[in-house]
Every structure is written in C-alpha cells, then in structure tokens.
Amino acid sequence: MIENLDQIIADVSGNGQFRFNQRQVLYVVRKIVRDETGETLTTANFQSIITDYENEHGEIPGMYREPRGSIYHPHRGETITLGTLMVEEYERPAWTYNKIVYIEKEGSARR
C-alpha cells in the first residue's frame, strides 16, 4: 500500500491542485489491497497505517480529516465541529471567559 501512496495522492489531489480527505485515499487503497492480497482493508487499519506513515514522514500535504468532535462556545451559543478544515479556519473569539472545560469522550475504552 505504501509503495502506491504517492501515486494515489497525486490522483485524488489532481497532482496537488486540490485538497482531499483521508476517505478518498482509503477508497483507492482498499481496491489495491483487495486486488493484490484478496483481503479487505478496514477503515481502522487504514487510519492506523496512515497515522504511522505521517508520524514517520510528516503530514501528507493537502490531506484533511473529517470532523470528529466539536467545541461549544457557551457565551456565544455556538457549536463548531472539529475537523482539519474547521480547525485551520478557526479564530478564537474575543475574550469572553477566563476558564475552559475540556471533556473528551469519543467511543469507549472497554472492549
């Protein structure tokens, strides 16, 4: 899969002209893995491989991830989803509070 990654990224990004999301890469990679190994590449396994790749080589230019959470501004009554594109565009609001509560609860740690 990794040996095909540069070409896949070039294909889904129009040779670097467009942003692309992780899922677009997955759809192309999934077919390659199925054709070469007969196995089905799961989303979780793919995400793990991409994360390991980026940890070793740096972020993949132009790739963004879909929202996986949100931030709520209680004094503005506004909820903002948190994905790569939203975080890149986020501008901290004018000073309206001096404390923040952060709660992370995505999925379950129990198996």
Image (spheres, grey):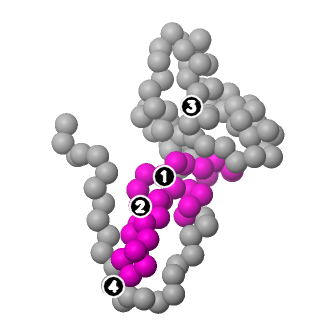
Indicate the secondary structure of the residue bearing disc 2: strand
Mark 4 nearby-residue class (10 Å; few <14, some 14–19, many ≥20): few
Mark 4 vs mark 2: give the one in front.
2
Callout 1 touching callout 2 (CB < 8 Å): yes
The answer to whether residue 84 is magenta is yes
Marks 3 and 1, how far apart at CA: 16 Å
Callout 2: 10 Å neighbours few (<14), some, many (20+)? few
The amino acid at mark 2 is: Ser
Gap in Å between the C-alphas at discs 3 and 4?
39 Å
Q: Name the kind of residue labelled 1 in the image.
A: Pro
- Secondary element type, mark 3: helix
- Disc 1 crowd rating (10 Å Cα; few below 14, some 14-19, many 20+) is some
Query: Quarter of the image containing the C terminus?
Result: top left
Residue placed at 59% from the left, 19% from the top?
A: 31
Determine the residue positioned at 51% across, 87% down: 94
Residue 70, label in figure: 2
In the rendered image, which residue does mark 3 sit on? 26
- The image shows residue 108, relative to residue 90, as above or below, that is above
The boundaries of the magenta stretch are: 58-87
Q: Is residue 6 visible?
A: no
Question: Which residue does the image show at 70% across and 48% down from the upper left?
Answer: 19
Amino acid marked by disc 3: Leu
Marks 3 and 2, the one that precedes in the sequence: 3
Which quadrant would the N terminus be assigned to in this image?
top right
Q: Are marks 3 and 4 in contact (CB under 8 Å)?
A: no
